[in-house]
Image (cartoon, rainbow, N blue to C red):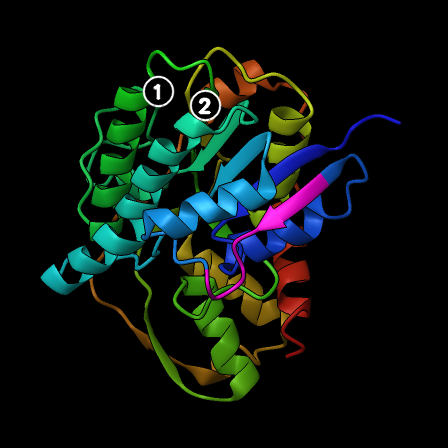
Amino acid sequence: MKKKIRVLITGSKGFVGKSLKKYLKNQMELKVFCDDKSRFDLSKKKLFKKLLKNSKPNIIIHLASRTASGSKTIKEDKHQLKNTLKPTKNLIECIKFLNSVEKLIFAGTIEEYGKAKSPFKENTRAKPITSYGKFKLKCLSFVRKNLAKSRIKYIWLRPSLMFGPNDNKGRFLGSILYSAKEKKMTSINLDKQIRDYLFVEDFNRFIYLNLIKKDFPKIQLLNITNQNWVSLQLVMNLLSKMSKNKVKKYLMIRNIKDHSKLINSGNLLKKNYPNFKFTDFKLALKKTLKSYNI
C-alpha cells in the first residue's frame, strides 16, 4: 500500500483554511493535519515546534495570518506582527530540524501590491497600503532570505479576493450576505470600484491538482486568478437578482467616489497551467448565496 502524503494546514480555523481542510480530507492519498486546536498558538515557537513534531508533514500549506483588510492602525500592526509575521518566522526556523518537509505552499495576498499599477503582474513592484499587505510582504522577504539555499521547495501564492460558502463577515460579500441572513442592516459603498474575485473552491482544487499532486513550477511567486474583473455594482446587482432583492433589502448604500482597481494578471498562471478550469463566476456566486439560506 502506497504511503499517504502528510499535509499540514496552518490557519485552518479561518474561512479559506476550513474550506481547504474539508476538500483535502476527501482525498484518499492524503493524511491531513491542522492547527485547529486552541492550544496551538503559532506565534509561540515552542508550540509550533510541537505541532510539527506531532504531524511530521511532507507538505505544509501556510495560511495562518490575521486578515484585517483596509486597516492601517498601530494597533493593527501589532496584531499583524503576532498573527502573521511571527508564525511565518517560527515555521521557517522550526522546519530546519524536520527532515520530512519537502514542499511549502504560502498564501500571500493581492493586497501586497497595494497602490501599484494594475493589473498586477508577479514582477510588479509591491506598494502595500494596508497593514495586512505590508506584513505579508515582510513574510515573503523573510521566506526568500531564509530558503534561498534550502533543499525545501516553496511557492508564494497571491490569490485574488476569495469568496465562497460561509465567507467571513469582514469581507465585502460575506458582510452583505450575513446582513441579509440575520436581517440586520449594513452599510456599503458602491461607486466604480473594480475587484478581482476568486472562488475558494477553485483555490482548493488548484493547490491539490497542481501543487500537491505535481512538482512545483520553476517560479516561486504566482498570482492565482480567474481574472474575474468585476465592478462591485455588478456583484450587487447579480446578488439582488439571484436573491429576489432579499440581499438589497438590508443594505444602506453610500456613493462615495471610489474608482480603485484591485485586479491580478493571470498571464503567468495561464502559461504554466493552461488546462486548469475555473468555475463560472455567476455559478460560484449562486453556490455561495445558497449556503446562506437567504
Which quadrant is home to the C terminus? bottom right
Residue 231, compared with residue 157, is above or below; it is below
Residue 121, compared with residue 201, is above or below; it is above
Residue at screen point 37% across, 49% down: 46
Query: Which span of residues is magenta-colored?
Result: 31-39
Alpha carbons under labels 1 and 2: distance apart? 8 Å
| Image spot of residue 97 (x, y percent) | 43, 28
Residue farthest along the bottom direction in this orientation? 183
Residue where numbered disc 2 is placed: 154
Residue where numbered disc 1 is placed: 147
At label 1, which amino acid type do we have? Leu
**Front residue of this view, candidates 57 and 194:** 57
At label 2, which amino acid type do we have? Tyr
Q: Is residue 263 magenta?
A: no
| Image spot of residue 252 (x, y percent) | 35, 81
Query: Pointer 2: residues within 10 angstroms few (<14), some, or many (20+)?
Result: many
Residue farthest along the left direction in this orientation? 74
Element at label 2: strand
